[in-house]
Image: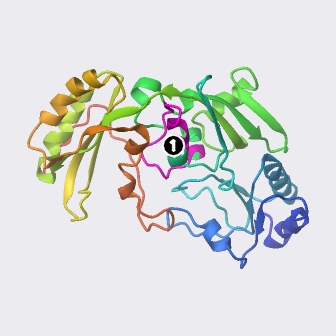
Amino acid sequence: MATAAAISVGDDLAPSFGGRLLHPGDDGYDEARQLHNGLIDKRPALIAQCQTTADVVDAVNLARDAGAELAVRGGGHGVAGRAVTDGGLMIDLSPMQGIHVDPRGCTVRAQPGLTWRTFNRAAAVHGLATTGGVVSTTGIAGLTLGGGIGWLAGKHGLTVDNLLSAEVVTAEGTVITASDDEHPELFWALRGGGGNFGVVTSFEYRAHPVRDVLAGPVLHSLTDAHDALAFHREFTASVSDELTVGAALLHAPDGSGTKVAGLVPCHCGDPDTADAEVKPLRAFGAPLADLVQPIPYPVVNTLLDGAFPKPKGALNYWKSGCAPRGAVLTERG
């Protein structure tokens, strides 16, 4: 990896660079390198906060010529820590937050610094939505390049299923468009492959007519979690594509610290059909609270925000795992 001294040639970009170039010790450096996951503490030799695609090209060329490790940060969480580097160059795309909605063509073109909160609000003005996560502070770039599960996935597919094209800066510093018609192999790789294929500077999405949805948490006592999760498994096996149901063990939203089991439906279809299809879930067991109601789609994307109260610096231990198909929850209490 290149040394900090080698990266310091980034000063040569200053006359033409449209964003900010941050070195260790500069005002804003520590804030820019911090991710949602506070356990990640890496120190880039240079942070390039880009405003335009041209800025990204300059930063990529600098990293390549200096032989530096390159990390790319969008506008969201960066839980895994790959959005920042020790001693290398960090491209920070969070200032790039442009968005354009085409209501006639039902498409949205958005830059990678956006979060889904901003994306959803802009699309909702035109009665449109694209599948986009379950927490509004998630960045559109990371979610899209990782696949993208969200409340509309049953009806409208994953986020990547709705990606029409992407503007990409390659390792050579070339700007290309990847789509089904142009560079199709790269487009295939971008849709769920994560990083290392280039820096995406613009996403074009398909959008769908979605306004209000029937959604909200139904909360059960933690002692009833086994039965609630078993019900979720059986219930979701036969519901329509319009209904997505999340299940989680969480704290009650009243701030009491009470641990509960939550079933969260989101029905994006006809209101009359929605009421009938969600009714068995609302009637199951003896819920502590039933907060299901018609709400605008952007609101449902904020329902789990309370579980991610800090935009940066949360000191949580993150881990994931896979359960074998057919696994049965056996512990109670």
Spot occupied by residue 171 in the image (x, y as percentages of width and height) = 80, 45
Which residue is found at the position 23% from the left and 24% from the top?
277
Image quadrant in which you'd find residue 234: top left
User: Which quadrant of the rendered structure holds the N terminus?
Assistant: bottom right
Which residue is found at the position 55% from the left and 49% from the top?
115
Number of marks present in the image shown: 1
User: Which residue matches tag 1?
Assistant: 121
**In this view, 20 is above or below 107:** below
8 or 156: which is nearer to us? 156
Spot occupied by residue 201 in the image (x, y as percentages of width and height) = 72, 43
258 or 293: which is nearer to us? 293
Q: Amino acid at mark 1?
A: Arg
Image quadrant in which you'd find residue 329: top left
Give the residues drawn in magenta, as a range: 119-141
Which residue is found at the position 65% from the left and 46% from the top?
112
Q: How is the image coloured?
A: rainbow
Spot occupied by residue 322 in the image (x, y as percentages of width and height) = 37, 42
- Label 1 SS: helix
83 or 15: which is nearer to us? 15
Residue 123 lies in the magenta-colored region: yes
Query: Seen in the image, is 55 located left or right of residue 194?
Result: right
Query: Seen in the image, is 16 located left or right of residue 75?
Result: right
279 or 134: which is nearer to us? 279
Residue 238 can be seen in this image = no
Residue 35 lies in the magenta-colored region: no
**In this view, 41 is above or below 300:** below
